[in-house]
Image (cartoon, rainbow, N blue to C red):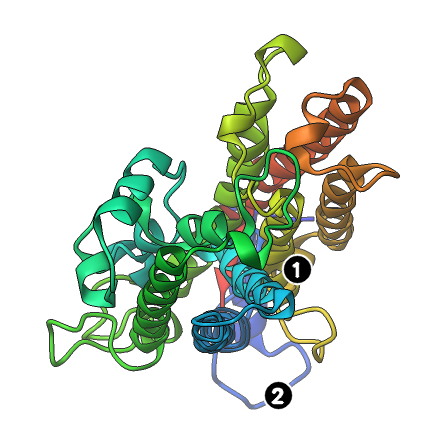
Amino acid sequence: MNFKYTAIALTLMGTLTACGGSGSDDSSTPDPVVPETGFSFAATEMVTNLTNDVIVAGYADLAAQGDALLLATQALVNSTSQADLTAAQEAWKAARKPWEQGESHIFGPVDSLSIDPHLDSWPLNTTDLQTQLDNNTGFDAETIKSWNDDVQGFHTMEYLLFGDGVADNNKSISDLTTTEREYVIALAEVFRDYAKQLDDAWQISHNPQDANALPYADLLTSPGSDNNTVYSSELAVIEELINGMIGIVDEVGNGKIADPFGDSLANADTSKVESQYSWNSLTDFADNIQGVRNVYHGEFIGSADKQGIIDFVAAADSALSVRISSEIDDAILKIQAIAGNDDMPFRQAILDEAGRTRVETAVTALTTLQTSLESDVIPLLSEWNPQ
């Protein structure tokens, strides 16, 4: 409960203190204590942990997966082994995971350096992709970097490695042409380079054109410093993190799922399904919300307990902090449940009546989570008393 004292009451309090009611000879007169409104929380540890152990660690993993993906595609040069193609497909999926989870904090260098469109443009321009295959040989990374984003990145590699995804996602090694092998290897090299650039931006310098630019991680962990023109306070950092969570929940529910789902079975459009060639869509969506969970809890699953946004929320309302955690987990489970008992890929689920019902259930869970973040968590920013 908050109390407001009248001027008369404060005067009386000051007088009683000055009189030293117990006979004390202490002549000092302390200022009257007026309880604060809102809640208090020391955020430095949380911000530092989320920066280093979630965001930076995630991008370091992405860079490592980029190296592994390049090696896996290089093994395809003269291979006739289906196991080599399967290994390259698995390497693609492994690189996809830290990227999709990282979409919960898709701000900073991933945006300013245009790495997001370079790596993850969708939809794929299959017409131009085929033109490149028909008119080029001996692909090299630097040339590909000059091409449009919709013929490079994750989904171009996906199409080459998995096939068109219509009937299945099990391309045969015998169907992988020499030109496709050359192209996918060069694409993996481009991917490796951009993933490393993103990792370096967070750990070395966020602006390669500025010799004095700090690592982007330092901007989050030292808000308000003289050379930090991005974040003026920890409040600004926490707001960025929470809005990042809201942004990806909204994108998954109202974009990635809703756009291909359509307003009826007749209007479902599988051409809008992201990661449709690999049938990895539901894993992508679940990983997006897993990324929200990473930021909220402050650690990856299986890691030691660290401070996350949940601790900020709990300082204001412990019941709310638990409810948000439950809603995040529920959204992940409902997305995974879209597959049903037959492990149905998302592109097939939106064309199936029972599948569409499961999709609607998942969207409802995402809407609930988004509403809670917007209506219950964001207002806490204005109630917080930083320490």
| 300 relative to 233 in the view: left or right | right
Which residue bears the numbered disc 1? 310
Crowd tier of the residue under label 1, counting other residues whose Cα lies within 10 Å: few below 14, some 14–19, many 20 or above: many
Where residue 282 appears, as percent x and y from the top left, is: 66, 43
Give the numbered dot on residue 351.
Answer: none
Q: How many marks?
A: 2
User: At x 69% / y 21%, what residue is drawn?
Assistant: 351
Q: Is residue 86 left or right of residue 192?
A: right
Q: Earlier in the sequence, mark 2 or mark 1?
A: 2
**Residue at horizontal 59 percent and vertical 42 percent from the top:** 373
State the image coordinates of residue 278 (x, y, percent, origin top left): 59, 47
Question: Mark 2 falls on what kind of element?
Answer: loop
Q: Nearer the viewer, mark 2 or mark 1?
A: 1
Spatial separation of the CA atoms under disc 2 and disc 1: 46 Å
Residue 169, visible in the rendered structure: yes
In the image, taking residue 22 as reference, residue 143 lies left or right, namely left
Residue at numbered disc 2: 24
Q: Nearer the viewer, residue 119 or 311?
A: 119
Above or below, 246 against 177 in this view is above
Please name whichever residue, 121 or 364, is drawn nearer the observer in this view of the structure: 121
Disc 1 element: helix
Amino acid type, callout 1: Ile
Query: Based on the displayed image, in which of its 4 quarters is residue 128 positioned?
Result: top left
Tell me residue 304's x, y (percent). Answer: 71, 80
The residue under the point 47% across, 83% down is: 28
The image shows residue 384, relative to residue 251, as above or below, that is below
199 or 71, nearer to the observer: 71
Quadrant housing residue 187: bottom left
What amino acid is at disc 2? Ser
Q: Residues within 10 Å of mark 2 (few under 14, many from 20)?
A: few
Q: Is residue 12 visible?
A: no
Residue drawn at x 51%, y 75% as measured from the top left: 61
